[in-house]
């Protein structure tokens, strides 16, 4: 399937959902949802989707690009931003819409503007519609996602190879940032985490000028963007001979992760998957040191649904979901470990897309 056909398919699904929800038209402003439906990644546009078609409104900065991109996808209207309200007013009047859907992420400012000229129209919150579609990745997305994950694997391998005693967290963090672009990423999908020694007990540590010492673990959490899609990968190698305590928490974390991966399949709820990993950690006596959820969906955004967590909703996993599986044990003031992989839910189980070795890596 070409990317153009994928966009047409996704828009068709939106139309079908609008019919089911008895909503006459949907207005899309969210940048990520816009990219998902059309491929457009500029900073300003509106989409209006109804049963007759798709209208794409942008300003003259993007006129040429958008016109070329939207062929066979949407009808392009290039409007100076000052005329957009009037354009909407005319469109809504002409089509006589009764119910118009908006995304939950519309700002209060945008809402007030919209309310001003839609007084007679019933506005509904359809904020769950497009994220619901985005939860299940299509083949076109999976191709891109595999490239993003390969990039993360390569950067992880390179980063671990460059670790040496005396290097600072900040130096390694900068190296990762540069590698991510050098090896083909658009940029990082989030600011990488490099946490060494006692800092490794902070799950979201910010890199400091602290130098790596012998015997210390170094948690590296990184990801890059390829074609708009994010990767997310964590490893915790150790520089020289580790302490017994670290080896113990590493083994337990890995066992917890493998138990969750072995169980992952369609029809499971995110709470149950989380509980499988959490039980392993709790039974080993470290339950109080695993303070975050087991994992999260990923795609055009670094954190999406579905979640694998005690607070996950009632959603049951489906083929095409992408989730991270990232248990951790963090012992305050001493050390921590997190092992994170990137997993695709398949028809009968799951496929771990990230290939970086998971066994404890001892550097030097
Ligand atoms: Mn993650």
Image: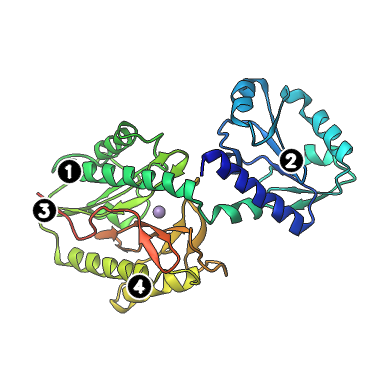
Near-viewer residue (359 or 50): 50
Residues at marks 1 and 4, CA–CA distance in whole angstroms? 32 Å
Near-viewer residue (221 or 182): 182
Discs 1/4, front: 1
Which disc number belongs to residue 287?
4
Label 3 close to label 1 by CB (< 8 Å): no
Q: Residues within 10 Å of mark 4 (few under 14, many from 20)?
A: some
Near-viewer residue (198 or 318): 318
Q: Residues within 10 Å of mark 2 (few under 14, many from 20)?
A: some
Q: Which residue is mark 1?
A: 161
x and y percentages locating residue 84 in the rendered image: 77, 28
Label 2 close to label 1 by CB (< 8 Å): no
Q: Earlier in the sequence, mark 2 or mark 1?
A: 2
Near-viewer residue (302 or 318): 318
Instruction: Quadrant for residue 203, please give it.
Output: bottom left
Q: Earlier in the sequence, mark 1 or mark 4?
A: 1
Left/right placement of residue 273 relative to residue 207 reads right
Label 1 close to label 4 by CB (< 8 Å): no
Q: Which residue is mark 2?
A: 53
Residues at marks 4 and 2, CA–CA distance in whole angstroms? 53 Å
Q: Secondary structure at mark 2?
A: loop
**Residue 59 visible in image:** yes
Q: Earlier in the sequence, mark 2 or mark 3?
A: 2
Q: Quadrant of ligand 1?
A: bottom left
Q: Which residue is mark 3?
A: 240
x and y percentages locating residue 123 in the rendered image: 80, 49
Q: Residues within 10 Å of mark 1 (few under 14, many from 20)?
A: few
């Amino acid at each position: 399937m070409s990317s153009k056909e994928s966009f047409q398919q996704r828009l068709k699904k939106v139309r079908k959902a609008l019919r089911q929800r008895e909503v006459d038209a949907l207005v899309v402003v969210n940048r990520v949802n816009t990219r998902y439906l059309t491929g457009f990644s500029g900073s300003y546009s509106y989409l209006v989707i109804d049963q007759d078609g798709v209208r794409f409104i942008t300003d003259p900065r993007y006129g040429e690009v958008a016109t070329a991109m939207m062929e066979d996808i949407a009808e392009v209207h290039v409007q100076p931003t000052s005329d957009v309200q009037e354009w909407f007013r005319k469109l809504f009047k002409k089509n006589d819409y009764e119910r118009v859907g908006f995304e939950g992420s519309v700002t209060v400012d945008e809402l007030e503007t919209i309310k001003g000229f839609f007084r007679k129209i019933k506005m509904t919150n359809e904020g769950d519609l497009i994220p619901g579609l985005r939860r299940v990745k299509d083949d076109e997305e999976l191709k891109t996602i595999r490239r993003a994950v390969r990039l993360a694997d390569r950067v992880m391998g390179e980063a671990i190879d460059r670790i040496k005693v005396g290097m600072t967290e900040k130096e390694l963090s900068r190296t990762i940032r540069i590698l991510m672009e050098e090896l083909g990423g658009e940029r990082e999908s989030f600011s990488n985490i490099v946490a060494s020694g006692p800092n490794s007990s902070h799950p979201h540590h910010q890199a400091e000028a602290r130098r790596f010492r012998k015997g210390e673990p170094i948690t590296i959490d990184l990801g890059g963007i390829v074609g708009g899609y994010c990767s997310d990968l964590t490893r915790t190698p150790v520089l020289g001979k580790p302490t017994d305590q670290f080896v113990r928490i590493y083994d337990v974390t890995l066992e917890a992760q493998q138990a969750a991966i072995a169980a992952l399949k369609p029809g499971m709820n995110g709470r149950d998957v989380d509980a499988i990993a959490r039980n392993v950690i709790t039974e080993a006596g470290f339950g109080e040191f695993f303070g975050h959820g087991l994992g999260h969906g990923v795609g055009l955004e670094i954190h999406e649904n579905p979640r694998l967590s005690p607070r996950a909703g009632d959603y049951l996993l489906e083929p095409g979901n992408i989730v991270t599986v990232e248990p951790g044990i963090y012992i305050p003031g001493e050390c921590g470990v997190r092992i994170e992989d990137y997993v695709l839910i398949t028809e009968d189980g799951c496929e771990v897309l990230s290939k970086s070795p998971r066994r404890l890596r001892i550097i030097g």
